[in-house]
Amino acid sequence: MALYNDTGIVLRSYSFGEADKIVVLISPNRGKLRAVAKGVRKTKSRFGGRLETFAHVDLVLYEGRNLDTITQVSMIEAFTTIRADLNRVVTAGTMIEVADVVAQEDEPARRLFLLLQRGLRALDGGAPHPDLLTAYLLKAAGIMGVAPALEHCAGCGSEGRLTRFSFAAGGALCERCRTPGSYALRAGVTGYLASAAASDLALLPEPDPAMTGEALGVTRRFVEYHLERRLDSMALLDA
Ligand SMILES: [Zn+2]
């Protein structure tokens, strides 16, 4: 049986059989990876604690007919600061949820893996930037191939006043192109989103408290529209 090495961030895990777990990871090389961790629900498991959600781990696996089995785990980054704070857990949970929906099995996911890694690192540092999740979602939309038009009208391409936003049309619209389903945006929100989308997650521009809420709201609904599902983790932020 063939042994191989891989690296990945744990997206989630669930019980399997008497004492085992199925661990779902995102690997840059293989995309979504499902593997069995044997015996990890027993108290004396060698590596169960290293396979928690958010953990970035290196693995040794052996190939099985249906599922591969994890034989060794080493921790690369545990993101312990995230785990100690409920708001960060919710934000990280949303990042993980998006990566989980977008990644496919047996399809390399390097950009998505790196985005998630950078997002978790930014969240694990000092006080999280209020626009971190907004920027993450905008970058994820780019990886999905649906980056919203923010600096020009999604209808006619003009760079004039972009006062409307439409999920179906693919982003900001000018007054001339406004569609019945599009909604009004506060002046400056599209430019605010454009600079978040273009920035490194660790180096986001100075936040504007008047913009952060609307920026996240419109981005979240845009991503939900294109994923054709609600982001369950974000429902916790609504509460
Ligand atoms: Zn237009």
Image (cartoon, rainbow, N blue to C red):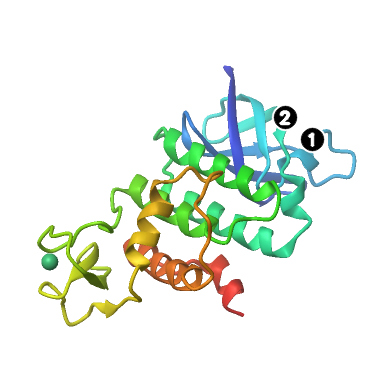
**Label 2: which residue?**
73
- Residue at numbered disc 1: 47
Q: Position of residue 118 (x, y in %)?
A: 56, 41
As helix, strand or loop, the secondary structure at mark 1 comes to loop
- In the displayed structure image, the side of residue 195 where residue 86 appears, left or right: right
Q: Nearer the viewer, residue 51 or 79?
A: 79
Using residue 86 as the reference point, say whether residue 186 is left or right of it: left
Say if 23 sits above or below 138 in the image. above
Q: Quadrant of the C terminus?
A: bottom right
Q: Is residue 151 left or right of residue 87?
A: left
Classify residue 20 by image quadrant: top right
| In this view, 195 is above or below 72 | below
Badge 1: residue crowd in 10 Å (few <14, some 14–19, many ≥20):
some
**Relative to 173, is 123 above or below?**
above
x, y percentage for residue 207?
53, 61
> Which three-letter amino acid code belongs to the residue tagged 2?
Val
> Residue 90: in sight, yes or no?
yes
Q: Are marks 1 and 2 in contact (CB under 8 Å)?
A: yes
